[in-house]
Image (cartoon, coloured by chain):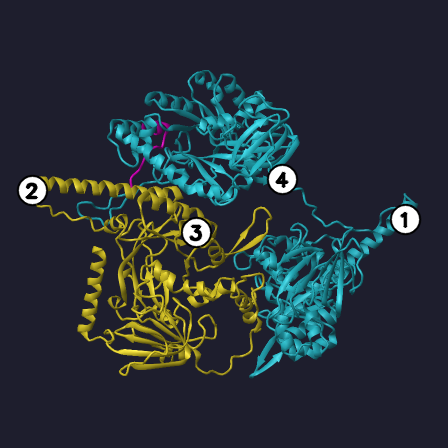
Chain colours: A cyan, B yellow
Amino acid sequence: MKGMSTSATARAARGGAVLMALALPVCLAGAQDGASLVVKAGKVITMSGPPLAPGMVLVRDGKIAAIGPTVDVPEGAQVIDATEGVVLPGLVAACTTLAETERDTEESVTPELRMADALDVYAEFRRPLSGGVTTAYLSPPHGRLMPGQGAVAKLGRGEPSASVLADPCALLVVLGEWPKNPPLLWHPPLPPTPDEPSAPPEKQLPTTRMGELALLRRTFADVRSGKLTGFRAEPVKAALDGELQVRVKADRAEDIRNALALGKEFGLRLVIEGGTEAYAFAGELQGRDVPVVLVPRLVPGQATEVDSQQAYDVFGGVKPDTLAALTRAGVKVALSVPDAALPDLLVAAASAVGAGADPEAALRAITSDAAQILGVDGRVGSIAVGKDADLVVLTGDPLATRTRIRMTISDGHVVYEQKEDEATTPAAGKLLILRAHTVLTGTGALTDGEVRIRGRTIEAVQAASEAPPDAEVIDNGARVIMPGMVDAQSHLGLHWESEQVSLRPAPATAGPGSGGPRLVSVADAVDPTDQVLEDALRAGVTSVAVAPGEAGLFCGTVAVMKTGGDPFDRIVEPIAALKFSMLGGSQRAARPWQVRELLDSARNYDRDWTEFDRRWAEFQRKYERKPEAELKELSRPRRDGQLEVLRGLFRDRKPAFVAASRADEISRTIDVFREEYGLETVILGAEDADRVSREMGEAGVAAALGPRVVREERGRVISLAAVLAHAGVPLALQSQATSGTQFLRATAAHAAKLGLDASEAVRAITAEPARLLRLDDRIGSLRPGRDADLVILSGDPLELTSRVEKVYVDGRLAYDAEAAE
Amino acid sequence: MVRASRCAAVIALAAAWVAGTGAQDAPVREKIAVKAGKIIPISGPDIENGIIVIQDGRIAAVGKDLEVPWDANVIDAADKVVMPGYVEAHTSSGMGTPNERVLEVPFVSAKDGVDPKSVFMEDSLRDGVTTMLAIPGNDTLLGGTGVAIKTFGLTVEELLVRDYTGLKISLQPRGDSSRMAHLARFRKYMADLDRYLGEYADRKADAEAAKKPFDEELDPQKQPMIDLKNGLLSAFVYCPEASDVVKAFELADEYKLKIVPVLGPRCYKAAGLLARRGLPAILDSALVVWETNEDTETEEMKVVPKIMADAGVKFALQRDPNNYETRYLWMAAARCVAYGISREEALKSVTLYPAEIIGLADRVGSLEVGKDANLLILTGDPLDAQTWVDQVLIEGKVCYRRAEDERLKRLLEERKPPPEEKPPGDEAKPPEGGEAPAEGAPADKEKPPAGKAEP
């Protein structure tokens, strides 16, 4: 028996040794040998003695070398001046799941699992470090009765960013609701034989609180009597021998009582974790040397409800005065919070003080006492000579609301530093001048030109001239500056394949009156974090018209948004145009009549409301003069969601984007939309446009072509773009893609190769789509007053050998190819 | 040693069988001289206008101004480039499903899964890969053992270069299992194995003490793990994440295992550790990873081979035949050069280094006297996209001639020029912002807009 236990410790020691062997060279490589660091503070709260005010801490080789009111500053030492601030030891979070999310094993009892195995030592622990947490207990997941051994990790940055400080730290036992009803167990023999046939899955304990205790007793008793030995029994044996702490997750009073009874029965070294109702045990725990790790359900920025029974049972909503009650009774307490709240661990301590705890006790619960409970107080938890140089530099009293963490130091390295809040918009006064050999304005070109940008907008585009002294000048040499490209139609960010856009309108025949949702801009459905927007940005497309697909007659609204810049301010125009579809199907013959019906209603609606508004305004004017005037004959027209949107065609002259492919569809579109209703019409797709190009040119409709700009007929290749340009049809290019917008420039290049004039080709992806969307006062060209969206290319944009080097959106550098590599 | 001799016996047997059946693949008992415009021997500087003399399937001489033996068949490659066949240190392709569902199956062998007639083998030969380690996939804790094979032959026996090479261990937790449960499973297996071996030794000692015959054999299902423990096999440890590399070394130290790390793409973070341990590694076919920097919240491009090379880690490249971008070893090497790795290192990472990793550096991976005559005769520089593999010699036998490659011919045969449909830019365009996948876009463009089909 003794042999077993020593082998368990030996294994633990060996594991530790291996880890040390791995971690040690890393630490040495990371730390600048002999380099030292001095922190000067207004106050140093050491947690190992009285606070020093003022105080200084000298750090050498990752360890604390000296502390005192003043220390000798060695030559070449880095000095951190926090004379206004306060220094605390790095915080110790006594219960986290930083290594593993809640993924439970199949079996109820798996003491052999080691949490240290699950720690990603290369992960970034930015959030905990931003809260000053440098040491964390890694808890196994809480879904099984005995889910494994917790470990303690040291957090930092570098390679690797974390290391294991203690493994194992404690054997976890979970009581209460969590471990009930584990899954069925099935161990099929491999292969099954007549002697050992395949058996059905077995049920396992526990389903009840009785079952939990029975299974625990059996496990401990079997190991104690030597009935259960081997790999799985080793940690349990260590716990029975008092070498390994047993941490019991117990929230309700009966669970805590059971835990204490179990500890007494088997002589275990207990730690109670969770402890929702631990306040009731202050007396019982007094003098028993059973520490408590409290884990209140703190949600940053949200008031926590503690009265609900649900919160007590499941989430461990700890009563705020528990810490006060326990510490007053002399019970050692550590305080931790759920992972998401780790940046606010100090807030948890402050609220405990608010509920009656002694401020020093509250701080101890997140530093020295927590370290002692975890058994790592020899290394961390207080500021003392020889301990790890883990420090938190605060702007003031650690428990004050407005105090902020200025920096976190782990092993003598600054691992977190609070960034000054960056201005979200560039300083309006600062002038940025971008120069290049060629400046394409979207409508023309300049040689040796410059673009002057102030804030978000373009101030001037001119030949390079002398810069004012305060301006920042970037000379791009032989490169080309062009306006950010504009995609005349795409489906970016709408996740076309995977999710149906809910804007899908009713069939055309459903008639007006049913369409409240169509007031909605399609921009609301766009996922602003979609990777394809970033892809488009990298290719120099800074604005895209986003439209739903071609379902029904009225397909929905077209929004224009930027692909970069401030993610919350990307929408240029929520409803820039309205999209219709004249595409065939069985209703081709009926489509013109449906259009007439729809547009008639919209026009009448617009007329009625315009008339009403006019008369209402007239009445109000009259009323001001003659209050006794009566509101006669003034009946308010009915509001209608769909017609309200369609009214934009007539009132605001919003363009109609009409998908039409065959020649007859295009002709019908011209007849109805353009000739009969006089709307600004842009034909999308227009695959057969060459047959009706003259008609299109004469009627004054525009076309958005793409992604195919050629058509083939009887072996003859027809360049649609060239034909339409020849017929005088205003021309824009579209990607019509969910993810292919980055090839917009390639489409333009292809059109140019097939005979479209080069300047027209550039225009078709910059100024023209912006004009068709009636947004040419903001995007699509480099002219004074426009948004400073521009692209710097290594060469001619129509050459596929040239590449996008920089993209500016709203005057800010949004993509830099060099930096991205 | 026992194992090695057994292997040799297996090979000898196989060879004898092949010879006995009079198969076309009988060892070549003749002299061949290859006159090359340029020889890239990998192990030394390039040789212009050199000659390689092959005898009995092995390289007998390499150099300039060598005498061509009077009885040698001469292959004239005066306008061509000759280099050793590519070696791939790790592949699970060409064997159908590469993983068992049961997590601990060290006793299965890739030898039983390799399909000599698979398109993958044919493609490998066409693309110049002459030797590879076929090993079970990355989804099983103790996945089974691998075999080193060449890429030409009708049966697995003909393919065999060396049986029983490497055991796959995967640190990728399966399904909803956690990392610690996965590792605990491994430790439990090792503890159980220790106990089994102890009891076996006790029984053996008891029998000897009692002077009784002892004929109990070791459990064959455990044999590969026993060989692993005894250093007769090396473990190819798949590490999906950087922290798994740490664990792999921890296990190697704890159980005294010889390991070869097979890395996932995000393992670039462990480059420093790999360099300190001085072990060569097998890289994932994805050479570039984009990651968000938490500090700056910008995306950063990480070029894995560059990071490894800068840290001083030797690496072998591998293919992913399911992806056009990653299906050629030469292309992976060419991309490494594009990312700033020296040409020599890049070429070694597809020839000599993988050969060293699978323990066959004495036979393949470079053109040196005594090594197998696995030669590629290329129409130009190996890293040039315009270059074709013209002929492949494996163990001195011409196994592939481009002129006779019917399938390739059919692919490339003269057709009427395809209709101008797609903008040519889609292919020709340089990837903007790094690695924008070029495949997605044309597909999107081809897709009919939703609602068009449906009235």
Query: Which residue occupies the foreground of this view, B41 or A620?
Result: B41
User: Which numbered dot is residue B211?
Assistant: 2
Residue B2: x, y in percent? 20, 55
State whether residue B151 is above or below residue A367. below
Q: Amino acid at mark 2?
A: Lys
- The quadrant in which the N terminus of chain A is found is top left
Q: What range of the chain is rendered magenta?
A: A201-215
Q: Residue beneath label 4, please?
A: A418
Distance, label 1 to label 2, CA atoms, is: 126 Å
Residues at marks 3 and 2 on the same chain: yes
| Marked residue chain, label 1 | A
Distance, label 4 to label 2, CA atoms, is: 77 Å
SS class of the residue under badge 2?
loop
User: Is A567 within the magenta?
Assistant: no
Disc tally is 4
State which tag comes first along the sequence, 1 or 4.
4
Residues under numbered marks 1 and 4 in contact, where contact means CB atoms less than 8 Å apart: no
Residues under numbered marks 1 and 2 in contact, where contact means CB atoms less than 8 Å apart: no
Which residue is farthest right?
Answer: A625
Distance, label 3 to label 2, CA atoms, is: 53 Å
Q: Is residue B319 left or right of residue B301?
A: left
Q: Residue beneath label 3, please?
A: B275
Q: Residue beneath label 1, please?
A: A622
